[in-house]
Image (tube, helix red, strand yellow):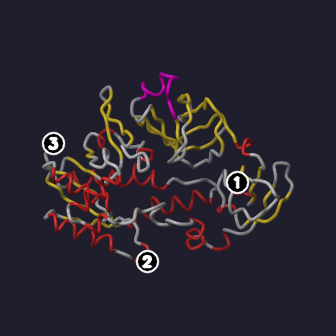
Amino acid sequence: MQENKKVLLGMSGGTDSSVAALLLQDAGYEVTGVTFRFYEKDNNTEYLDDARELCERLNIPHITYDVREKFRQQIISYFINEYMAGRTPVPCTLCNNYLKWPLLKQLADERGIYYFATGHYVQKRNIDGYWHITAGADSDKDQSFFLWGIPQEILERMLLPMGALTKREVREIAAERGHLKAAHKRDSLGVCFCPMDYRSFLKEHVEKDLIVPGNFYDECGNCLGKHEGYPFYTIGQRRGLGIYLNKALFVKQIIPQTNSVIISDTLRSLEQTEMYLTDWHVTNPAALFETTDDIIVKIRYRKQANRCTVTPTPDGRLHIRLHEPLAAIAAGQAAAFYRNDVVLGGGIICSTE
């Protein structure tokens, strides 16, 4: 597509995408806003009104695009199925990499718009001819962990106006420009369709006879008590187990076939030194596979990083050798690779053996 000064901005109605619209206009771009209807809890569409109102104030076109059915099929069904398989899903990662950004590109292409943007707190950088996602300036808001799967044809056209800003600066910009509602909006937390406890969501959306009580066992096979159903537990979980032995207890293994949950009384027994990934994406293979230096893998969004070596396997997976043991690795989680602040790729954990 011919490069131009047009940009399609994903607008959620929140603070970040609202300020992104302001900054893109300031930079001379011809902005069109689009709000995706992914999921509407209790049929609440206030976010649509907020996005539309801001676009009217800025005199920019606004589009609403209903993808609720696709979201239900690709993200919500996946989320439920992963828990029912005893795995730990990563819906925000899949949504960003395989739904949200590809949709932005599709709609931009249809409208002759070269660039597309969001309010993500990330940046990008060209290294050795490859575009990479890099961490946002605000370490508390950085969302680079979720964007390891973006292909080059999308990366090269992405604009990321939030990347160099902190959340505080973003709120100040909104207030200074008179957009007080956007300035004071609360941050969205957790998964958009179940921001609080996923167990309540499963109870509402899964047939009752598919989640039934079962047994906790220790590592020697002794029964320790009853649990509420294996999908309600995740590897490494400590709180909310409902059994009390005057010592810390951790979920070590989930066995859906027998509705069993294996408990350990030592976190060290959950440590692993390797794992395998499937559904992986690597931006520049030479930068990841041909070095053993300074590669970091993260399996959680915040405050966790381990040095590793990454090797492709003959069966198409990635083998990750951890230089230090890591506890509570769960199948289904995402893993993202970094060198300093640069995202090199990532994938979905399929096993630890």
Going from N to C along the chain, the mark reached first, 2 or 3, is: 3
The residue lying at 66 percent from left, 59 percent from top is: 233
Q: Which residue is mark 2?
A: 42
**The magenta stretch spans residue 346:** no
Looking at the figure, which quarter contains the C terminus?
top right
Q: Secondary structure at mark 3?
A: loop
Above or below: residue 36 compared with residue 328 = below
Going by the image, does 7 lie left or right of 186? Answer: left
Give the magenta range.
Answer: 285-296
Q: Position of residue 1 (x, y in %)?
A: 18, 43
Q: Secondary structure at mark 2?
A: helix
Amino acid type, callout 2: Asp
Q: Which residue is mark 1?
A: 254
Amino acid type, callout 3: Glu
Q: Quadrant of residue 327?
A: top right
Q: Nearer the viewer, residue 287 or 298?
A: 298
